[in-house]
Amino acid sequence: MSTPKETAKHLIDHMSDQASWEDIMYELYVRHKIEAGLKASEENRTVSHEDAKQRLLKNAG
């Protein structure tokens, strides 16, 4: 498993030389969110699609 710093370096190294600060920050943000979601899944900290749907519908009305 790589460290966050190694992952960030890898992402940046594989981006276009024309990438803007916004492009870089977006890629890092998305990668962070994906990693957090995978960790939550491994720790069984998720809800089913049906539960999520019910929560949204309950809050919408």
Image (spheres, rainbow, N blue to C red):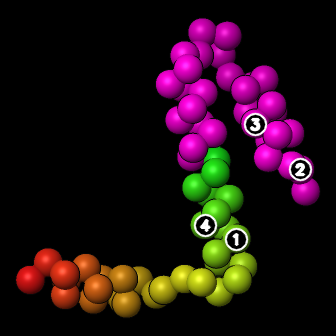
Who's the residue at 56% across and 46% down the image?
Answer: 30
Q: Is residue 41 left or right of residue 5?
A: left
Disc 3, disc 2: CB below 8 Å?
no
Point out the tag, 2 or 4, that comes first from the N-terminus: 2
On the image, numbered disc 4 is attached to which residue? 37
Point out the tag, 3 or 4, that comes first from the N-terminus: 3
Residue 3 at x, y percent in the picture: 86, 49
Checking the image for residue 2, the label placed there is 2
Who's the residue at 73% across and 26% down the image?
Answer: 12
Give the residues drawn in magenta, as a range: 1-30
Residue 49 at x, y percent in the picture: 41, 83
Disc 2, disc 4: CB below 8 Å?
no
Identify the element where label 1 is drawn: helix
Disc 1, disc 3: CB below 8 Å?
no
Amino acid type for the residue under numbered disc 3? Ala
Who's the residue at 63% across and 39% down the image?
Answer: 28
